[in-house]
Image (tube, rainbow, N blue to C red):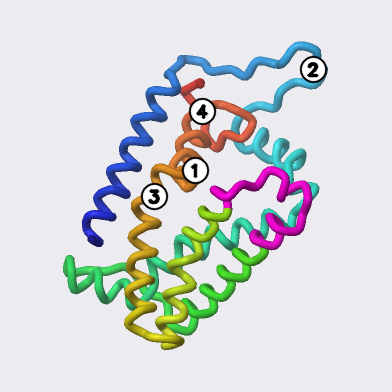
Amino acid sequence: MVWISIAIFFGGIIWQVIRFLSLSSPVEDPKLKRPQGLAAEVPPAGAGGFLHALKLSIFKTSPGMIIVTSVFHFCLVAVPLFLLGHNILIERAIGFSLFSLSERTSDVLTVVFLLCGAFFLYRRLFLARVRIITSGYDYLMLLLATAPFITGFLAYHQAFDYKLMIVLHILAGEAMLIFAPFTKFVHMVYFFAVRFSVKGEWALGSGNRNW
């Protein structure tokens, strides 16, 4: 099941990259057009334009949200990749593994991740401006992201029945891999694809494609 979920994950990513290429088109000199009636010029692409747009974004009005989101995404990627237990299994399977964090560090990062998840849940439940645009799908996505961490944390600390927790942890991780390329999690692909190849005020590269 692990290999099937990994195959679906990477197959889905490849499909999404192909889909991105089909939705965009290469151009020799992509330019941003200024909307009619807009007096100010659109900031140029690249670092300068990115920083200018950042100042006008949520970073200015809600820096705390940006910090929590960044920490959440960092832990979401770093903990599974550099977890000692995962890397032991990877080494047994293919003969080599990545750098591993200490068990204490992974444990702390897991708690930090779950606190970030609780923060997002709080916003969706109790902030009217967030709750009004929240659907059951959003709660499902949050559950899908946090379930592998919750079950892994409980299994590591041998809370409840260990065998049950480790099985739920494995199933939750596989479910996340399978659904990631076909749900909102696909932004992990489109974030980089758009930022580095489509010209715009949020571009991190010169950009040679337009929508």
- The earlier-in-sequence mark between 1 and 3 is 3
Q: Amino acid at mark 3?
A: Phe
Queried whether the magenta region covers residue 130, the answer comes back as yes
Q: Are marks 2 and 4 in contact (CB under 8 Å)?
A: no
Distance CA(mark 1)–CA(mark 3): 12 Å
Q: Which residue is mark 1?
A: 187
- The earlier-in-sequence mark between 3 and 2 is 2
Q: Residue at x 38, y 29 (%)?
A: 19
Q: Which residue is mark 2?
A: 38
Name the mark nearer the viewer: 2 or 1.
1
Q: Residue at x 43, y 42 (%)?
A: 189
Q: Which residue is mark 3?
A: 179
User: Where is the N terminus found, in terms of image quarters?
Assistant: bottom left
Q: Are marks 2 and 1 in contact (CB under 8 Å)?
A: no
Distance CA(mark 2)–CA(mark 4): 22 Å
- The earlier-in-sequence mark between 2 and 1 is 2
Mark 3 Cα-neighbour bin, 10 Å: few <14, some 14–19, many ≥20 = some
Characterize the magenta stretch by its predominant secondary structure: helix
Q: Amino acid at mark 4?
A: Val
SS at circle 3: helix
- The earlier-in-sequence mark between 2 and 4 is 2
